[in-house]
Amino acid sequence: MSTQLFSSSSHKNDSNALTKTYILHFDSQVDAKTKDTAIGITIYDYNGSRVWSGHHLLSKDVDTSSITRNVADYMALWDGLQIAHHLLLSHSSLSSSSKQEVKTKLEIQSTNELIVKQINGKNRVSSSNLKPWYEKVTSLIKEFDHAKTGKIDKDMNKFTTKNAKLALEKRMSTEKYTEVMKLLSQPAEDRAVKMQRNGGLGGVEQNIISSMPEETAVYAVKPPTQSMMQQFNPMDQVPRDEFSQQHISQISKPKPENDESEHGKIHPDKTYILRFDGGSRGNPGNAGSGMVLYDSEDGSELWCGHFFLGQATNNEAEYMGMITGLQCAKSLGVRHIVVQGDSQLVLRQVDGTYKVKSPTLKSYYDEAIGLKREFVSFQTCHIAREENKRADELANIAMDTKGSDGFNVAND
């Protein structure tokens, strides 16, 4: 099961405490021939900015000849938790000068399904090699105000995996990894003195990085909870051959009837998740797009819609899903967005990794890029088809009914 991307790194709960949320990724790599073992660790804040990252060659410290991949992953998690615990407590102490209570939330995300299930109590720990590490890890997890563990796909962990591979290839550890682990080996009293002397974080990265490589902006999102689909006025049909920016220049949700409506829940400082999908029966053939807007904090569905393109290709339908979803999100007041879909082509073209060679897709691409620039923060994330079932369902509704719903379109 996937875990969620929290919507805010600092917010107040009912007890007026300030809550900060972070995400921990970890991975290990084992050389099949030499048995050398390396680990990678990355800590992110709520919006995907990298707070800390590093890699370490375990073979420098311990005999790894008999270490299994599961043990190596547990060792990576153990080090990651120690670093996260240190960073989060240090960061909290720095930001709590107002004497306001500060609590921390940690999302532990892993590709190792066995470890996730063991930590969540779904699998027993029968291996004598894993049990000591399991006990150490679960004991430290309890030190956090709130922590949860979830499974993610390999694509979502590739930055951390890349770091672990780098440590294995270069047979080295990053200096900051060595520094922080050396600090953590000191008594708590000495550590506190050094933290205060160095501005709170004991020589490791203090400032949250404002931006990061596109390949790191990948997160799992909690599956949406069951919610009622908000119904809107059907839109006028737009023939595929007449597609242009003007045709979708004003997509809007009707004005809410009261303050308790879904529209009233959109907050400009929060991050929202847009999932899109598209399909074509014939490619080209009858094509439809589906799009869903989620609250990234609780996974609830805030808005959804489907768009019938008429005769179009699958890629055109995918693009139209993203474009229509972005238009609707913008009209609802969303300013920070993470766009998720299972079309690697569309996502990689929009993030600049792939070039747009098709003249037909160029107009869609230009429209998407124009919309991208209108958001304060914009990230893309490739997800598996299984995680995109809701958008896929809506795309099929568009193709089945040959209709569109969920928004209005004003044609020029």
Image (cartoon, rainbow, N blue to C red):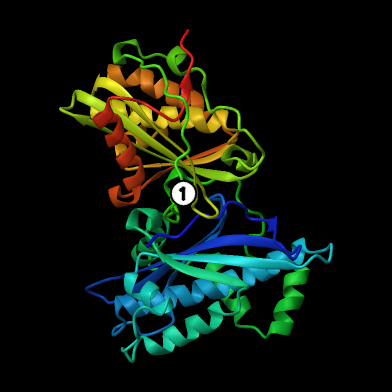
How many discs appear?
Answer: 1
Q: Which residue is labeled 1 in the image?
A: 227
- Look at the image and tell me whether residue 356 can be seen: no
Residue 329 sits above or below residue 383 on the image: above
Q: Amino acid at mark 1?
A: Ser
Residue sitting farthest toward the bottom: 128
Residue 273 lies, with reference to residue 26, above or below; the image says above
In this picture, residue 379 sits left or right of residue 93? left
Pick whichever, 29 or 21, lies toward us: 21
- Give residue 187's quadrant in the image: bottom right
Residue 361 image point, x, y percent: 31, 22
Write down the quadrant of residue 237 in the picture.
Answer: top left
Which is nearer the eye, 229 or 60?
A: 229
The image quarter in which residue 297 lies: bottom right
Residue at the top extreme? 412
Q: Position of residue 280 (x, y in %)?
A: 22, 29
Position of the N terminus, as image quadrant, is: bottom left
